[in-house]
Amino acid sequence: MYERKMLPNLNCGLDLIGEVLYGKWKIRLLWFIHQGHQRPSELQRKIPDATRRVLNMQLKELEDHELIEKKIYAVVPPKVEYSLTEFGKTLIPVIAMLGNWGDENEARLRELILRRLGSSLAE
């Protein structure tokens, strides 16, 4: 397991939110849980590019940061569901605004990303 060599910089809100939301799939996980996809298998289907291990690690981190909660049902086979905490629900409007900005600038962002990928592949 990865261990930090240095303590994170936690001096401003941007540093704090970066520390909590850093991870390729965390914002999508929060959004999909908000939309009602609560079971790990549902989340895996919504994000097929992510491995189960990475999703589990990021779900655990979101749980540690009190953005989601995990409920384990005592049934066979075991059943697990995730839900947003009240604290986690406060992020949904922020995520929605970021998504809207991405939608409004989709063509430009796609062009810039593809151009950058093209130049890095050519090197």
Image (cartoon, grey):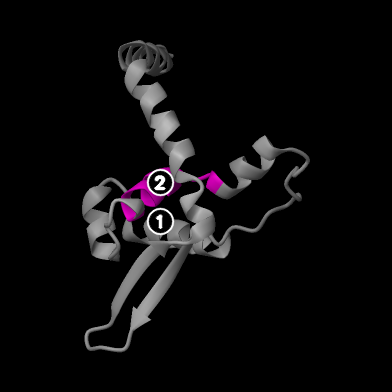
- Residue range of the region highlighted in magenta in the rendering: 21-33
Circle 1 SS class: helix
User: Going by the image, does 20 lie left or right of 72?
Assistant: right
Q: Is residue 45 left or right of residue 116?
A: left
- The residue under the point 67% across, 44% down is 16
Q: Is residue 10 above or below residue 3?
A: above
* Residue type, mark 1 in image: Val
Secondary structure, magenta segment, majority class = helix
x, y (%) of residue 114? Answer: 34, 16
Q: Is residue 103 above or below residue 27?
A: above
Q: Are marks 1 and 2 in contact (CB under 8 Å)?
A: yes
Specify the label residue 106 is tagged with: none
Residue at image position (40%, 46%) is 25
Residue name at image x 46 percent, y 60 percent: 57
Q: Quadrant of residue 39?
A: bottom left
Under mark 2, the amino acid is Trp
Whole-percent x, y for residue 12 in the image: 74, 38
Quadrant holding the N terminus? bottom right
Which part of the image, by quadrant, shows the C terminus?
top left
- Whichever of callouts 1 and 2 sits on the residue coming sooner in the sequence is 2
Q: Which residue is mark 1?
A: 54
Q: Which mark is residue 25?
A: 2
Q: Nearer the viewer, residue 31 or 26?
A: 31
Give me the C-alpha separation between circle 1 and circle 2.
Answer: 9 Å
SS under mark 2? loop
Q: In x, y percent, where is residue 120?
A: 43, 17
